[in-house]
Every structure is written in structure tokens, then in C-alpha cells.
Amino acid sequence: MKIAPRRHRGTRHRRSSEAHYRQALAEVPRPADEPANRMREVMYLHLTRWLPHLLDRKDRLSMDVGLEVRVPFCDHRLVEYAFNTPWTHHSFDNRERSLLRAVVAPLLPSSVIDRTKAP
């Protein structure tokens, strides 16, 4: 008697996940004058798929202990502005958050502006 090899149980789930991922990438708005950019795709997926879960969790945990937590960088106007800014401006000095650093440079001491990102 010959036994057929077992199929991987996650095959259907993996195909479904890949299809959802391809569908999500197809939704990413891309300006006509900008070439395809992986960072734009990652930010869009983060904003539309992951961030809502994080904000929901933040709300639940903070309300559980009677805190009101604010997330000022999640203001929709700021997020839309940052998302629609050309991606070359986001890391023009080869550092993370270049645009934010340049904007707040006149307001903050250089020790804050120049420090490295903490993990």
C-alpha cells in the first residue's frame, strides 16, 4: 500500500494571504509622476491594515485603567500630507524622519534633533 504524501495544512491559508496581500498592494495610490516606491506601499499597508488595530488596542488598554491617550501624529491631515509628500523628502539626509526633523529643527535643541532613533 502506497501512502500519498500529506499536503501542507497551511497551503490554502498561504494562498489566501498572498491574494489579500496582492489585493492590498493594488489599492496603494500612486502619483503619476513618481515611480513605484516600496516605502509608499509599506506605509499604506501600515496605515490601512495595521494601525487601526494598534489604535483600537491603545483605546481598550488606556480606558481599562482610566487614561485618555492622545496620538497627535495620527491627525488625518498630517498623515495625508506626509503620505502625499514625495518620498525623496522623507529621507533626504539618509536618516529616518528627515522631513519631521527639518520641520521642527528651529523649535528643538540640536541634542534632540541629532539623537539616533531608539528601538
Image (cartoon, rainbow, N blue to C red):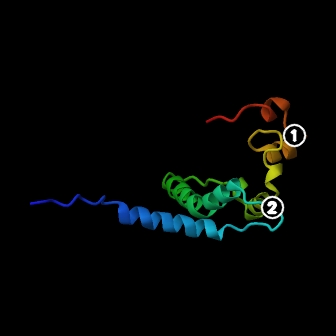
N-terminal-most mark, 2 or 1: 2
Nearer to the camera, 13 or 104 = 13
How many residues crowd mark 2 within 10 Å: few (<14), some (14–19), many (20+)?
A: few
What quarter of the picture does the C terminus occupy? Answer: top right
Residue 82 versus residue 107 in the image, above or below: below
52 relative to 35 in the view: left or right: left
What quarter of the picture does the N terminus occupy? Answer: bottom left
Q: Residue furthest front?
A: 1
Residue 42 versus residue 112 in the image, above or below: below
SS for callout 2: loop
Residue pictured at 64% horizontal, 70% vertical: 27
State how far apart marks 2 and 1 are (Cα): 28 Å
Residue pictured at 72% horizontal, 32% vertical: 116
Residue behind mark 1: 105
The numbered mark at residue 34 is 2
Q: Nearest to the eye among marks 2 and 1: give it.
A: 2
Kindly check if marks 2 and 1 are in contact, taking CB atoms under 8 A apart as contact.
Answer: no
77 relative to 21 in the view: left or right: right
Based on the displayed image, in which of its 4 quarters is residue 52 positioned?
bottom right
86 relative to 57 in the view: left or right: right
Residue pictured at 78% horizontal, 33% vertical: 112
Residue pictured at 37% horizontal, 66% vertical: 12
Based on the displayed image, in which of its 4 quarters is residue 58 positioned?
bottom right
How many residues crowd mark 1 within 10 Å: few (<14), some (14–19), many (20+)?
A: some
Nearer to the camera, 113 or 68 = 113
Q: Residue furthest left?
A: 1
Q: Amino acid at mark 1?
A: Ala
